[in-house]
Each structure stands twice: as C-alpha cells, then as structure tokens.
Amino acid sequence: MGFFFHVGRYFLMLKRVFAKPEKHKMYIKQLFHEIDNLGVNSVGIVVIISIFIGGIMTIQYAYSMANPLYPTTLIGLGTRDTLLLEFSSTILALILAGKIGSNITSEIGTMRVTEQIDSLEIMGVNSTSYLILPKVIAVVFIFPFLYILSVFFGLLGGLVTGSLAGVITMQQYLEGIQWLFIPYYVTFSIIKMFVFGFLVASVPAYFGYYVHGGALEVGKASTKAVVNTNILILFFDLILTRLLLT
C-alpha cells in the first residue's frame, strides 16, 4: 500500500507543480538560476567521464576484436553506437541522478525541515510550483545538450586514446564512426533524455518536499531519491527501447 500512496502523492504534487504561476518573471529568473546550477555546473563531470569512457571502450573493442576476420572499422562503430544508444543517455542519466538528484533533494529537504516552505505557503506562494517547476524545466532542457556533449567528447576520447595506445589509427577510427551511421539513434536517445531529465528532477524533488525531521532525515531522503530515480531510469529505458527500437 505504501507504493500506491507514494505514487498517488507524487502525481498530486505534479498537479500542483504545473499549476499556473503567480508571477512569470519570478519563475523565469529562477529558471535561469537552475539551468546554471544544475545544468552548466554538470558539464565538467560529463566531459571528463565521457572522455575516459570513450577511450576505455575503444581499447576494449580493439582487444575483443583482435581477429584478422574483423575489419578495424568495427572498433569505431562499436564505440560510436555504444555512446549513442546507451552510455551517453542511460548511463549518463544514472550518474547525473546522483549529482543533480541529491542536490535537489537536499536543497528542498533543508527548506522543508527549516520551515522555509511553510513560510512560502503562509505568504500565499505555491511552494510546490515555485521550487520544483524551474528545476524540472531546467533539467529537461539541459539534458539533451549534455547528451550531445557526452557523445562528442566520448568519440574524441576514443580517437585520442586509440591512436596513443596503438590499437587503431586515427584514419581507421574516423572511418569506423562514419560507417553504417543511423541518425535515428540520436533521435531515440534525445527522446530518452527528455524522459530521464523529468525523472531526475521530479522524483528527488518529491522526496525532498515531503521529508520530515532534521538533517539525518534529509540525508536518508537523498539516498532514497537517488536509488528510486535510478530504478525508474532503467525501467523507462527498457520501455522506451521496446517501443522505439522495434
């Protein structure tokens, strides 16, 4: 019964989140703040992780395909398709759920336990919409751009690492990442990023908004938020893959 209770309360919260804002200017200002805080500040970790993962995958593909029957172009192709279909979308969303999700839960949860949310309600402000809506829009907006950055730097990391490690030449790698390219893979993953962005923002916000107690409970809520967000990301990844790739 607890599961249905949380699901119902989550959708009731979303109903309040998407209610008509009191002052649009106030929300727009908050939106740009959230884009900078949650999105732009995540660029660094996305770039670093993508470069290393791209290099690691290139080396692993090179060694697993160390067979004269396999063309070397398969190394670049494998790295490209793995980045496009899964790493730069799903795995990246799982990583960002830990960074962005815990940030959102702790911020809103701290406001709840320090009674700042109660103060907003007393002033007649729709606290749910004011605190959560800019975060949801910011994360949904920025996630596709982070995906594109991740793919670019992942391929760049594979190019540099593959040539430095001597497992593939730059020309062979570039031929591989252009071979049998399917543009729909990008469209498919961007659709996933919109869904994942909504989950990464709204689920942690739910756990933070309804936390009760003190600092210890805020920490526990952050952990629950990240775990549940990751489970939902994998669940929706399975559903979207089944619906959009068949």
Image (cartoon, rainbow, N blue to C red):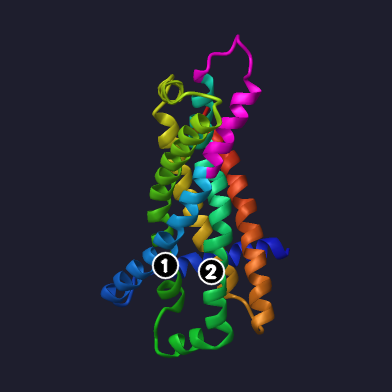
Q: Nearer the viewer, residue 63 or 176?
A: 63
- Which residue is label 1 attached to? 37
Residue at image position (62%, 64%) is: 225
Q: Residue at x 47, y 35 (%)?
A: 160
What element does badge 2 sit on?
Answer: helix
Q: Tell me whether the residue at label 2 lies in contact with that at label 1, contact meaning CB atoms closer than 8 angstroms.
A: yes
Q: Could you say where residue 94 lies in the image, as x and y percent from the top left?
A: 58, 51
Q: Residues within 10 Å of mark 2 (few under 14, many from 20)?
A: some
What amino acid type is highlighted by mark number 1? Asn
The magenta segment: 52-73
Residue 71, above or below 4: above
Whichever of callouts 2 and 1 sits on the residue coming sooner in the sequence is 1
Q: Answer whether residue 56 is magenta in the image.
A: yes
Q: What secondary structure is marked by label 1?
A: helix
Whether residue 162 is visible: yes
Residue 106 at x, y percent in the picture: 57, 74
Query: Residue at the top extreme?
Result: 69
Q: Residue at x 57, y 77 (%)?
A: 109
Is most of the magenta stretch helix, strand or loop? helix
The type of residue carrying mark 2 is Asn
Which residue carries the number 2 mark? Answer: 103
In the rendered image, the vertical position of residue 106 relative to residue 114, given as above or below: above
Q: Quadrant of residue 62?
A: top right
Residue in view at x 43 percent, y 52 percent: 143
Q: Is residue 193 above or below residue 222?
A: above
- Answer whether residue 81 is visible to the viewer in this image: no
